[in-house]
Image: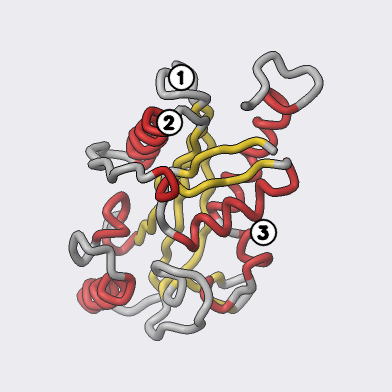
């Protein structure tokens, strides 16, 4: 089994990442198991923050690392909450407070539908000094609904409506969400790269 540390303590994200990478015989270990301290996300973009987190986790654990930085972009709010999605209503990262603030901000934006998208930037680093991190991106287009629906998922999932499915992200079963979501798309890209570069018979640098 290959071990990769995931630079997040968000159990919802950990489950999604572990599920998609499990067929590659990869064990995804949350950074909390190595007592990795939090790192300040000082980047001005999703990719900058993902690299900061991946490098930090690799440095503290001496393992290959994966980090994602993801969030919600709402067109009527000029892309907010964006990179501040997890702490939109304050530093505690409370999902209910973030959702409430989003709905309040949209009251001044006029009637919907309010188009939005989830973005995910996923970064893989072989080690803390890796000069060529793997960077993958996935996006999920949708709309913001006025009334939260569903008990699955986390973050803004109860408000994020996938029009083609007629369901919010929080109403989807985990396997279905992984199939269509921003994180699922980015992770499948990453899985393809890992297979080609590090896990295949032709790989020059196998994973530890």
Q: Secondary structure at mark 1?
A: loop
Q: Residue furthest right?
A: 201
Indicate which disc, 2 or 3, sits on the residue closer to the N terminus.
2
State how far apart marks 2 and 1 are (Cα). Answer: 10 Å
Q: Nearer the viewer, mark 2 or mark 3?
A: 2
Q: Which mark is residue 130?
A: 1
Q: Is residue 82 left or right of residue 58?
A: left
Q: Nearer the viewer, mark 3 or mark 1?
A: 1
Looking at the picture, how far across and down is residue 66, in whole percent? 50, 38
The quadrant the N terminus occupies is top right
Total numbered labels placed on residues in the image: 3
Q: Nearer the viewer, mark 2 or mark 1?
A: 2
Crowding at dot 2, Cα within 10 Å, few <14 / some 14-19 / many 20+, comes out as many
Report which residue position mark 2 lands on: 58
Would you place residue 125 above or below residue 139 in this image?
Answer: above
Report which residue position mark 3 lands on: 179
Do labels 2 and 3 touch, CB within 8 Å? no
Looking at the picture, how far across and down is residue 169, in whole percent? 53, 71
Q: Is residue 165 left or right of residue 43?
A: right
Which residue is depicted at the point 67% across and 22% down? 206
């Amino acid at each position: 089994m290959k071990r990769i540390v995931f630079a997040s303590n968000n159990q919802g994200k950990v489950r999604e990442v572990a599920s998609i990478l499990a067929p590659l015989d990869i064990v995804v270990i949350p950074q909390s198991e190595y007592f990795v301290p939090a790192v300040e996300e000082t980047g001005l973009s999703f990719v900058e923050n993902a690299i900061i987190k991946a490098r930090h986790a690799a440095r503290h654990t001496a393992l290959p690392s994966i980090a994602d930085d993801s969030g919600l972009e709402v067109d009527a709010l000029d892309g907010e909450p964006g990179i501040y999605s997890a702490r939109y209503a304050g530093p505690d990262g409370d999902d209910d407070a973030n959702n409430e603030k989003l709905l309040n901000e949209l009251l001044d934006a006029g009637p919907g539908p309010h188009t939005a998208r989830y973005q995910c930037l996923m970064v893989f680093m072989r080690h803390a000094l890796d000069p060529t991190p793997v960077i993958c991106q996935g996006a999920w287009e949708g709309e913001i609904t006025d009334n939260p629906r569903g008990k699955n998922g986390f973050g803004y999932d109860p408000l994020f409506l996938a029009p083609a499915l007629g369901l919010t992200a929080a109403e989807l079963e985990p396997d279905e969400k992984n199939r269509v979501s921003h994180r699922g798309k980015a992770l499948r890209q990453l899985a393809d790269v890992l297979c080609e570069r590090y896990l295949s018979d032709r790989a020059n640098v196998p994973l530890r």
